[in-house]
Each structure stands twice: as structure tokens, then as C-alpha cells.
Image (cartoon, grey):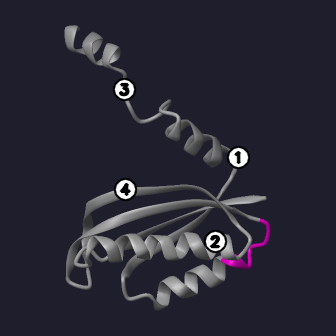
Amino acid sequence: MKQYEVTFIVDPVLSADEIKSTAKNYTDLVVHESGKVVHVDEIGLRQLAYGINKRNTGIYYSIEFQSEAGALIPKMELAMKRDERILRFLTVHLDKYGVKYNDDKRNGKIGKRSKDKKKENAEE
């Protein structure tokens, strides 16, 4: 199975329920098209690098999934293009290094410094 990751930005003006339902729609689409959702990450509210539709912030979501056929990708991208709640999206095929990096990140091996290392750096 091939592994993919789609990251999208949801309009921050929407209510919390609408934002969660938007993400759920795309996870349901993956499952409906015989894919397997590996991980859903709500990254949260972030500042945009440039304004999109007169918005300066957006709520980021990242869905990592597996799919046998690549036919799911065009359907998902078409649905995101038509969805007015989505500001931007990016779909990426993950190679073995990307899959390992995401696994390590979820397991806490990457991205967070331990308290002991912080103390050691502060003492130096």
C-alpha cells in the first residue's frame, strides 16, 4: 500500500463543530474509498505566510493515510477544491523515509527535547 499525507487549512471563521466536521468529511472519504487512515493531526491555529481570501490565520489539519489505488487522490483534491471551507491543501506521497519520520514524530523521538537535555544546555 502507498502512504500519503494531505495537509489542509480550514477557514478560522467557522465554528468549532464545522471545523471538526470538515476534517471528518475527508477522513470518511478515505475510509469510503477503501483507504486506511493512519493518523489525523489537528495542528491548530497558525499564522499564514500571506493572506488568503482576506484571512491572516488558518486552522491546519494533517491526515496521513494508506491507499492501494491512487484513484482516491483526484477525488479528494476535487472535493477540496470545491469546498469553500478549505483555504489551501497539499497532498504528498510519502516514501519510506517520510513514513519513518512521521512514526518517530508520533512516538516522541523527534520534535521534543527531553527535560534532562534542556537542563544540561541551561547549565552550560
Q: Which one is closest to the eye, mark 4 or mark 3?
A: 4
The residues bearing labels 4 and 2 have C-alpha atoms spaced at a distance of 19 Å
- What amino acid type should be assigned to the residue bearing mark 1? Lys
The residue sitting at 36% across, 26% down in the picture is 113
Mark 3 neighbour class, 10 Å CA radius: few under 14, some 14 to 19, many 20 or more: few
Q: Residue at horizontal 26%, vertical 13%? A: 119
For the residues labelled 4 and 3, say whether their Cβ atoms are less than 8 Å apart. Answer: no
SS majority, magenta:
loop
Q: Which amino acid does label 3 sit on?
A: Arg
In this rendering, position of residue 9 left or right of residue 82: left
Residue 11, percent from left and from top: 30, 77
For the residue marked with disc 4, what is the amino acid? Answer: Ile
Q: Which of marks 4 and 3 is nearer the N terminus?
A: 4
Residue 89 in the figure: left or right of residue 85: right
> Relative to 119, is 23 above or below?
below
SS at mark 4? strand
Judged by depth in the image, the label closer to the viewer, 4 or 1, is 4
Question: For residue 30, which numbered disc appears in the image?
Answer: 2
Q: Is mark 3 on a helix, strand or loop?
A: loop
Choose mark 1 or mark 2, whichever is in front: 2
- Residue pointed to by mark 1: 96
Residue type beneath disc 2: Val
Q: Quadrant of residue 42?
A: bottom left
Earlier sequence position, callout 1 versus callout 3: 1
Q: From which residue to which does the magenta span run? A: 68-72
The single residue placed furthest to the front in the displayed view is 17
